[in-house]
Image: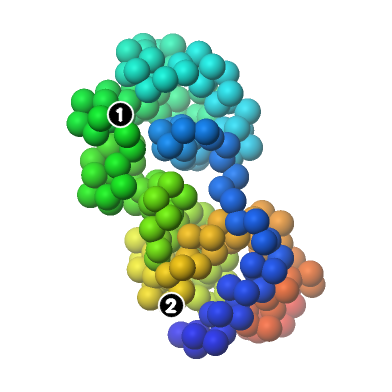
Amino acid sequence: MKTKETVRSIVDALKERYPDALCSLQYEKDYELLFAVRLSAQCTDERVNKVTPALYERFPTLESFAEADPEEVGEYIHSCGFFRGKSRDMVKCAQMLLAEYDGKVPGEMEDLLRLPGVGRKTANLIQGDVFHVPGVVVADTHCIRVSGRLGLTDGTKDPGKVETQLRAILPPEESNDFCHRLVLFGREVCTARRAVCEVCPLCEWCEHFQNSGKEG
């Protein structure tokens, strides 16, 4: 287990490299982020950002989504993959938000998890980015991979276990931004294909580097 000092050093190093810890999904309304995260499942954020402008132009309000034909929604999000399930979830989610939450995205974990297509990753992202709840951990693929390589977790690939382990060691006020920075770092340096250790600012604290002694 990393010491508090080591964890703080990793947090600070990533903060220095990526001072603007922003979600890469583009949105203007809270429910648009909710839908964008649903679209990002098994799809890149870059692809989602290419799809959503036309989608939100066609369906500019939550009411228009609630009244939409899922097949038509699917035509706009086809390139994101699994479009049939995603379009059904978005329409049902819009209907539920209007019927049960006065058209607003709820902030409580229990309420978020009731929404169609919403799991803990999505719920944590909404809590962190929309409601600024301290201590949230968005255990996406980059977070799981990089935190495991660093030794911040025990290497598990289970999102729930990664979330629990990171919540236990990260400063609550830093955790949400830290996860955003892990995404940026995971795309640029510590990629799924190869950890580019020769340009990594975290080697000093990284178990993967210390165990391998080289990049890879």
Q: Quick one: SS at disc 2?
A: helix
On the picture, is 210 further left or further right than 1? right
- Compared with 109, 52 (above or below) is above
Q: Position of residue 46 (x, y in %)?
A: 63, 37
Which residue was labeled with disc 1?
103
Which residue was labeled with disc 2?
169
Q: Which mark is residue 79?
A: none
Using a 10 Å C-alpha cutoff, classify the residue at mark 2 as few (fewer than 14 neighbours), some (14 to 19) or many (20 or more).
some
- Compared with 146, 184 (above or below) is above
On the picture, is 193 further left or further right than 94? right
On the picture, is 121 further left or further right than 45? left
Q: Residue at x 27, y 37 (%)?
A: 115
Amino acid beneath label 1? Gly
Q: Nearer the viewer, residue 120 or 112?
A: 112
Q: Residue at x 25, y 30 (%)?
A: 102
Q: Nearer the viewer, residue 72 or 24?
A: 24
If the image is split into quadrants, where does the C terminus sit? bottom right
Q: Residue at x 71, y 65 (%)?
A: 17
Q: Position of residue 150 (x, y in %)?
A: 57, 75
